[in-house]
Amino acid sequence: MADENTQTKKEETKKRPKRQPNKNYALKKRLPVKPIDGENVIFITKKTNFKAQLDKCCDLITRGEKEIILHGLGAAIQRCCNLALQLEILFSGTCQIEVNTGTVDLVDDLEPLTDELDFDSQVRHSSSIHIRIFRTAMLGANQ
């Protein structure tokens, strides 16, 4: 009985078409809302060079920042985690990591291609990660 139910569900998912954009609208993705702003807040993207992001974080820590907050969305989550782990290795014993995950609502504007239609918007959800890297001991201090 259970095998028949799972088999029918598999067949139903194969029949469903993938979500296609409407041909009457042009999809314009808005930038996500930034939670907080500051010098120690870094937004990680897939497009920025990883080495440049790592150097920026290292500069902030060596300049004396008490904490750095990394934010990553969607495909950049893996890069954000990798960056935090690299920082933990580079500053071994002096930094700790605190990780929070969540979901962010992203808004897309639907612009009509014809004059008869109205402007519209749609909301989609994306996974997010927020990593706080904070100092537990000062660099060069005797422990």
Image (cartoon, rainbow, N blue to C red):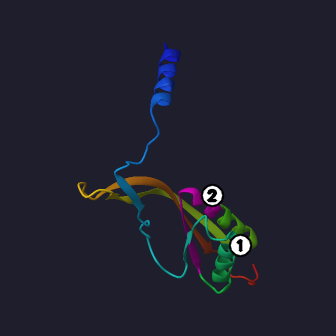
In the rendered view, tell whether residue 27 sits above or below residue 35.
above
Determine which quarter of the picture holds residue 95: bottom right
Please tell me whether residue 74 belongs to the stretch shown in magenta. yes
Q: Identify the residue under disc 2.
A: 78
State the residue at coordinates (38%, 57%): 26
At horizontal 69% and vertical 78% (from top left) the residue drawn is 55
Q: Position of residue 18 (x, y in %)?
A: 47, 39
Q: Residue at x 74, y 68 (%)?
A: 89
Compared to 16, does 95 lie above or below?
below
Give the amino acid at mark 1: Lys
Instruction: Specify few, some or many for label 1: CA neighbours under 10 Å numbering under 14, 14-19, or 20 or more.
Output: few
State left or right for residue 39 relative to residue 104: right
Check residue 71 for magenta coloring.
yes
The segment highlighted magenta reads 66-81
The residue that mark 1 highlights is 51
Q: Distance between the residues labelled 1 and 2?
A: 15 Å
Question: Which numbered tag is attached to residue 88?
Answer: none
